[in-house]
Image: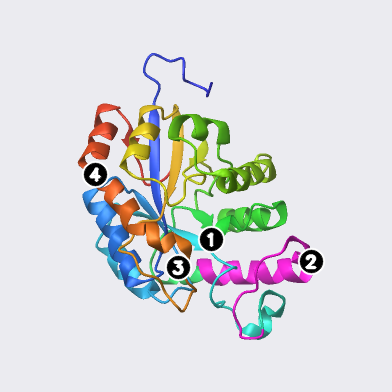
């Protein structure tokens, strides 16, 4: 039982976040539509993505959308000069696939440099970030998470993503996602459950949707909302109009973006939020 679940009217707050803001025009348009017409409250901006400038302009026209930094060291090219982050790059200047053994001191120093470059690009664009989170959950190991948490405090970013999903709750409430997804979520849970944020930086009580990436259709959303625990939950989503972006590499999630968008703007989902007394918020 989560804290507060025995209260007569336990408060339930929900951050509905879209990852990959800035990836492409199709993703940007889908995110803004999910915010204006649906229950989306926040988005995570990819500072090294090709549609970054467009995403910033669109965010200016959506003042109630919380915009954070989607730190990325696993996809595309860095903002830092290649000579400053050589341990992170392949021969063509793109990020190498992340390997745990590669997290040596030089790699960690270069990661901090690139994290700073990405955060500072978002700040220079006039965005006051509401949060920090991670492309492909790459910071689930302590050294990377601690760098990101420390920079969040330094740059006065109020929230960092809680990467630990309550796997058993998600299975019971939302349904079976497949063995591979379950193994991934359990591994992340084991690796992140003891991670802590620094003073001055908050986290949601839990992350949801990680186990069901690309599967959050209307039915699963209704199941999630019906059993949403007390406290503050974040649900990660990936809405869009479909398509991919060759500059950042294709992803299997692209085929699911339109279905996730339809669920986020569903009248039944919006009604369930209202009837459940769930407060939608852009951040902590």
- The reply to whether the C-beta atoms of the residues labelled 1 and 3 are less than 8 Å apart is no
Q: Nearer the viewer, residue 180 or 205?
A: 180
* Closer to the eye: label 1 or 3: 1
Instruction: Tell me the element at label 2.
Output: loop
Distance of mark 2 from mark 4, alpha carbons? 46 Å
Give the x, y percent position of residue 24: 37, 71
Ranked by sequence position, the earlier of labels 4 and 3 is: 3
Residue that label 3 marks: 122
Distance of mark 2 from mark 3, alpha carbons? 27 Å
Q: Is residue 111 magenta?
A: yes
Asked whether the viewer can see residue 256, the reply is: yes
Q: Residues within 10 Å of mark 3 (few under 14, many from 20)?
A: many
274 relative to 147, above or below: above
The mark found on residue 266 in the picture is: 4
Q: Is residue 35 left or right of residue 18?
A: left
Please give the range of residues in magenta.
91-119
The mark found on residue 226 in the picture is: none
Q: Quadrant location of residue 90?
A: bottom right
Ranked by sequence position, the earlier of labels 2 and 3 is: 2
Residue that label 1 marks: 135
Q: Residues within 10 Å of mark 1 (few under 14, many from 20)?
A: some
- The reply to whether the C-beta atoms of the residues labelled 2 and 3 are less than 8 Å apart is no
Give the x, y percent position of residue 27: 34, 65
Residue in view at x 39 percent, y 68 percent: 22
- The reply to whether the C-beta atoms of the residues labelled 1 and 4 are less than 8 Å apart is no
* Closer to the eye: label 1 or 4: 4
Q: Quadrant location of residue 240?
A: bottom left
Give the x, y percent position of residue 193: 65, 39
The mark found on residue 104 in the picture is: 2
* Closer to the eye: label 2 or 4: 4
Asked whether the viewer can see residue 198, the reply is: no
Residue in view at x 72 percent, y 76 percent: 87
């Amino acid at each position: 039982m989560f804290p507060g679940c025995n209260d007569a009217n336990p408060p339930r707050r929900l951050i509905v976040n879209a990852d990959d803001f800035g990836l492409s025009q199709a993703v940007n348009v889908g995110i803004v539509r999910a915010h204006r017409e649906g229950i989306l409250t926040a988005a995570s901006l990819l500072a090294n993505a090709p549609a970054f400038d467009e995403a910033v302009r669109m965010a200016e026209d959506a003042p109630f959308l919380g915009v954070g930094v989607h730190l990325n060291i696993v996809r595309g090219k860095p903002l830092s000069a290649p000579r400053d982050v050589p341990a992170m790059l392949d021969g063509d200047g793109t990020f190498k696939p992340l390997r745990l053994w590669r997290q040596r001191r030089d790699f960690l120093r270069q990661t901090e440099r690139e994290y700073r470059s990405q955060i500072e690009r978002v700040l220079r664009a006039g965005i006051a970030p509401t949060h920090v989170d991670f492309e492909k959950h790459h910071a689930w190991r302590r050294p990377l998470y601690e760098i990101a948490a420390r920079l969040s405090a330094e740059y006065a970013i109020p929230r960092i993503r809680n990467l630990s999903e309550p796997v058993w709750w998600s299975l019971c409430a939302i349904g079976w996602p497949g063995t591979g997804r379950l193994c991934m979520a359990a591994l992340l849970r084991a690796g992140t459950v003891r991670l802590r944020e620094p003073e001055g930086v908050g986290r949601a009580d839990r992350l949801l949707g990680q186990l069901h990436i690309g599967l959050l259709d209307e039915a699963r959303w209704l199941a999630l909302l019906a059993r949403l625990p007390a406290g503050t939950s974040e649900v990660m989503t990936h809405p869009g109009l479909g398509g991919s972006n060759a500059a950042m590499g294709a992803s299997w999630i692209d085929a699911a973006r339109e279905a996730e968008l339809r669920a986020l703007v569903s009248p039944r989902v919006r009604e369930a939020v209202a009837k459940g007394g769930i407060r939608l918020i852009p951040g902590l």
